[in-house]
Each structure stands twice: as C-alpha cells, then as structure tokens.
Image (tube, helix red, strand yellow):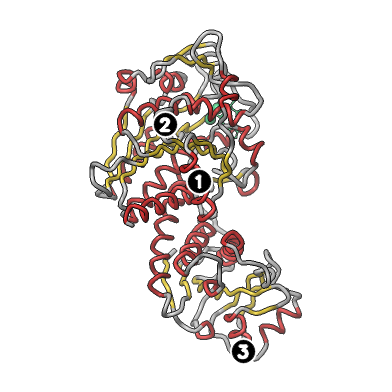
Amino acid sequence: MQFSTTTTDVSRIRSGCLVVGGFEGRRPTPAYRALDAASAGRLDAIARKTRFQGDAGKHLHVHALDGVTADSVLVVGCGPQSEAMTAARYLKIAGAAAGAAAGAGASSVTWALGEIEVDDRDAGWKSRVAVERLSDAAYRFDAMRGKVDDKRTPPPARASVATTRGDRAAARAGVDTGQAIAAGTSLARDLGNLPGNVCTPRYLADQAKALAARHPKVTFKALDEARMKRLGMGSLLSVARGSREPPRLIVLEYRGAARSVAPIVLVGKGVTFDSGGISIKPASAMDEMKFDMCGAASVIGAMEACATLGLPLNVVALAPATENLPDGNASKPGDIVSTMAGTTVEILNTDAEGRLILCDTLTYAEQRYKPDVIVDVATLTGACVIALGHHASGLFSNHQPLADALLAAGEHAGDRAWQMPLWDEYAKQLESNFADVANVGGRDAGAVTAASFLARFAKKQRWAHLDVAGTAWHSGKAKGATGRPVGLLCQYLLDRASEASA
Ligand code: BES
Ligand code: MN
Ligand code: ZN
C-alpha cells in the first residue's frame, strides 16, 4: 500500500473510502459533523435508521452519500466520548477501523481518525498507528498459491492520512516510521507463514543475506556446523543432529553509531520446523510448528525496520536456525551435551529444543559482542500460552530497568508483554542427577523454568527474554503469523535511539 498525508477538507476528498469516527450515542466527531452538514443531515439519518450508535467495535459503511465527494464513508464506533481516550483504546479503534477499511473494497482510503485526541500521544504517533494497522489489515500471504482464482475483496492500493496543516510535518514523519515498521512486520509475517519445506535454515540465511544487500549499514554472515563445532556449541548442534538440513547461526550487524558503542543484541529462535524430535509431538496441529522460527523472523524484521529508519544505534540480530526432527542420528532423552559456556546439559526431553539452541547463542553474543543488552525472542513454551493466552508475550529479565523499558515499548506500540518472575526457587526444578543442568523442569511453571534455563547463560549480561509462543501466530480460521513482537522491538529501538540522540 502507498501512503501519503492530506490536508484536504473531509467533505472535499475526491474518491475512495473515507474513514471517520463517531462516539457512542451518535455523538459526532468533527469529521462526522462536517460530513453530516455536507450531506444535509443524511449521514446522521442513515446512522439513526440503521441503529448505528457509535459503539466500540461497530461500524457503518455508507456509499454514495449525497453532497459528499468520497465514494463511501466508513464511520467507526469510538465508544463513550466521556471516557478517557487512552493509547490502548485508540489502538483498538484503529485496529477495528483498519480491518473494516481494508475489507471495504475501495481502491483508496482516507484516514480521518487523527483528529481524535489521545492522552499523551501526538499526531506523529496517530499517523504511524494508521499506517501500521492499515498495512497489517491489508496483508495477504499468497506466495504459496498456484493458480489464483481470487474472489476475495482486494485491499486498497493507497491510503492517505488526513491531518491539519500545523501537524503535517509530524504526520509525515509518523507515516515514514509506520511504513518502516510495517515493512519489518510484513517481512516477519512472510517468513513465519512460509512452510517448513521452503523456509529452511538455509532459506532464512538467504533472506537475511538479501536484507543486508538492501541496506549498506547492515552486514551478514552465517556460522556453519564446522564453525559451531570449533566454538563448542554442542547444545545447538545436538538439535540439528536429526535433520538433513544443516543448521546456521545467522548474524546481521547494523552499524548506526560509532564502533565504540556497545550493541543491542537481538536473538531470535529459528526452529524452522519443530516435530519435537524423538520426544515427538502429537500429530494434531503439528503443522503450526513451522511457526517455531517466528522469533528469528521478528529479529530479522526489526533489523529491516531499524536499517530503513537509520537509527543511531548499533544493533546485532542473531538467529540460530535448525530443524528439530527424529532420526537415527537424533538426540535421545538422557543424552548429555556440552555448551559453549562449558556447562553440560542433560536432554530429558528433545522437544525442549529452543533453549538448547538459544543458550549457545547467548554465550556467543556475550563473548563476541560485549553487548549493552541482549533481548531474545522465542516461541519457547506451550506453558506460556497457558499462562498468558494470546494477548501478551511473556517477559523475563535479570535487569528491571530493561524489563520496564520493554514493557513500556510494548504498551506504546500496542504489542504488549507481561512480566513473569525469574526467582532462584524455580532454578531448582532444572537440577540433573547426571549433568550440570537438565533441559526441562517438569510441568509446573514451564515458561518460567525455560526462562530460568536461559538466564544461566546470560548471567554476566543485562538480558531479557520474550516468550512469544502465544502471540507470534494465530491458530484456527485466521491461521497465520502476526509479526509480533516486531512492533515492541522497534519501539524499544526507537526509544533507545531518542535517548542516544538526546
Ligand atoms: N516450540 C515449542 C513451544 C510451543 C508449543 C509453542 C506449542 C507454541 C505452541 C517448544 O519447542 C516446545 O516444544 N516446548 C515444550 C517444552 C516442554 C517439553 C518442557 C512445550 O511447551 O511443551
Ligand atoms: Mn519443541
Ligand atoms: Zn520449539
């Protein structure tokens, strides 16, 4: 979708679908009132007749409204006018509006929701939200379809964000930021949605390489098995043993600040298919384990946005990529492997493979980069989905200011996380009779014990872990990757960038 801004009066917008708000009890917004006046009261009469009240989550789509030059008007319910318009509330309205606008069948959209005042948020943020939510709603994944006999309504090709003259510069900047983040999110969704037979470790590496080729400040490399062996990454290598596809440790480095500035390192779990290995998963919904590389996809997506925005930071994205399959050569329950950190791990369950590839990557990050902070992102545990459902990613950290910054970024971006504990007590569940640590700690607090396992490998580091098992993709009818937590990561990077330049 192409984006622009406009300062044209809403009643003079020449074509396409015009998106305006309306509050509960048919209380008008300025744009609604202008359109009602231009149509000599027709708009409100239709709202009354169709019983559209302006309730949140409801919308009214009116075509060919007399006196209005736009092809159609989409009135989006904004809920009660008297209640505070928080950022979270506005994000919900914008999401619903974007969904309705994308499905409206118009070739262009004019977005006039920026006139609604939002607590602590400016015009730049509002136009950025418009772009992100419209892009998300218009997203299609058709790469794997053969002959397309497409009966679906095509999404709009263009969108214009309405703004006042005074806010135009801010709105434009917001559109640019939104487009960069939307492109990163869309890349993450594409990578997530691709099937395991296409999106292999090698394919992921090739995509990362292509990203680096598009951005002069990004460099790419990938560590192969031989290199991993020399580095002592026995844990990462053990997961790949059952697969014919060789593993890769994908490395993207973005240089936006002086060499002396310690980088922010993002680590993403890249299991391109997780069958569970010898501790094999049940067959139902196993197809969804193609999404087990969504952490990797999100750090690659965040890197894409960061490079497009040219942020004044140094950022490294690391993605250990492998399949987890059963085979005569695969790891078995009871096997003991040694990590790059020098500790040994008893693999009691081969399905707890994410932590096995992440621990060596965390050690590599610490030794190679001396990072400012490390943030890892992983579809790590089903237990996290039980704990938090699909609304929030699980956040764990050994450094509270970092946790607070990530929570705030998620809140700001509409890509929430919720902090979970990492107390010492949980680490006991990982004691092994034979090795330094076991890779599973029983059913209780499964998301916490997984995080606690990772924490052992990040002790010298300000580190946070996002368990995105419940947020990285949707199941069911709308099955597909969400691109989360690209929004959160980008907001964190933007926040760090504004600190850096302040
Ligand atoms: N990739 C899965 C986690 C997962 C499962 C994410 C279902 C989303 C939905 C991970 O590798 C895994 O299998 N974890 C196990 C850990 C257990 C063996 C301790 C799990 O959650 O069952
Ligand atoms: Mn698994
Ligand atoms: Zn997994």
- In the rendered structure, find residue 37 and report the number of the disc placed on it: 3
- In the rendered structure, find residue 321 and report the number of the disc placed on it: 2
Helix, strand or loop at label 1? It is helix
Cα–Cα gap, marks 2 and 3 = 59 Å
Q: Which residue is mark 1?
A: 404
Disc number lying in front (1 or 3): 1
Q: Is residue 340 above or below residue 34?
A: above
Residue at the (28%, 43%) spot, across then down: 261
Ligand 1 quadrant assignment: top right
Type of amino acid at the residue the image marks with label 1: Asp
Snapshot quadrant of residue 56: bottom right
Image quarter (top left, top right, bottom left or bottom right) of the N terminus: bottom left
The picture places residue 236, in percent across and down from the top left corner, at 42, 23
Q: Is residue 198 visible?
A: no
Type of amino acid at the residue the image marks with label 3: Ala
- Which one is earlier in the sequence, the residue at label 1 or at label 3? 3
Q: Which residue is more in the foreground, 466 or 162?
A: 466
Q: Is residue 197 visible?
A: yes
The picture places residue 18, in percent across and down from the top left corner, at 55, 76
Q: Residues within 10 Å of mark 2 (few under 14, many from 20)?
A: many
Type of amino acid at the residue the image marks with label 2: Ala
Does the CB distance between marks 2 and 3 fall below 8 Å?
A: no
Does the CB distance between marks 1 and 3 fall below 8 Å?
A: no
Cα–Cα gap, marks 1 and 3 = 47 Å
- In the rendered structure, find residue 30 and report the number of the disc placed on it: none
The picture places residue 212, in percent across and down from the top left corner, at 29, 45
Snapshot quadrant of residue 226: top left
The picture places residue 402, in percent across and down from the top left corner, at 46, 42
- Which one is earlier in the sequence, the residue at label 1 or at label 2? 2
Helix, strand or loop at label 3? It is helix
